[in-house]
Image (cartoon, rainbow, N blue to C red):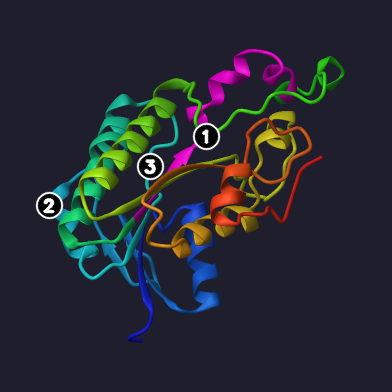
Amino acid sequence: MGNEKTVLITGLSGLIGGLLHSRLQENGGYRVRGLNRTFLEGVECFQGDIGEMGTLAPAFVGQDTVVHLAAQLQDEPWTGLLNTNIEGTYNVFEAARLAGVRRVIFASTGSTVRGYENIDPYSALVTGKYDQIKEPWPLVTEQMVWPSGTYGASKLWGEALARHYADTYDMSALCVRIGVVTTNDQAITPRERSCWLSHRDVVQILIRCLEAPASLRYDIFLATSANRWGYRDISHAKDILGFVPQDGAN
């Protein structure tokens, strides 16, 4: 027990939180706790709302790493985005700082670059107009931004906040721009086949971030599976983290 790494997952009741929790339990070496608004049976869990700073502090004490997954996943309502994605993300980083957490892994989103889908060749890729595409097409990298909606913009705020905390405090902050993770773990539509991130691959990259050396202070990683019609460049995640997708959509 004394050699286990402690990990706090916000939004543990969500799809990705559940997948990560299950894998960490299988692998061993981690003591996982959740921070959730609702009680979860059979899970060591703190109840609290990340939008309310006063409820968070006990959950962060003694944690080595925080995986921040809790978020509102759509543009509306704005009050939800403000409470959860803006104020809530600040509260998570600040509570982590106060508790001496060594690393925060911030679940960003592919919506930070989804705006590129407004122009070719990316619009053709996500609508399945493959006969209009000339190969090879230029890939969108982790250094590029073109947010889609207020949701995408709110996640860019989180990435910028992560940069600030990594620069200013003794904390590592890694941001993962998560692709399309489907409940059924399948890529059906053309857009899903372009941006899909399988259950195995989303868990893999988060664990790679958990296990990355402490010297990695800040970075942003695009995360999709090895999709035939993908446009997001995942080579940086491979080079820095060793992320190699196990799955891919054709």
Left or right of residue 186: residue 40: left
Q: Earlier in the sequence, mark 3 or mark 1?
A: 3
Q: Which mark is residue 9?
A: none
- Residue 225 higher or lower than 116, as above or below: below
> Which residue type carries mark 1?
Glu
SS type, badge 3: loop
Please state which of the two labelled residues, at mark 3 or mark 1, is closer to the viewer.
1
List the residue tagged with mark 1.
Answer: 142
Residue 245 location, x and y as percent? 68, 53
Residue at 49 percent across and 21 percent down: it is 146
Residue 143 location, x and y as percent? 49, 30
Residue at 39 percent across and 25 percent down: it is 153
Left or right of residue 238: residue 246: right
> Which stretch appears magenta?
104-125
List the residue tagged with mark 3.
Answer: 71
**Residue 75 visible:** no
- Label 3 packing within 10 angstroms: few (<14), some (14-19), many (20+): many
* Residues at marks 2 and 1, CA–CA distance in whole angstroms: 34 Å
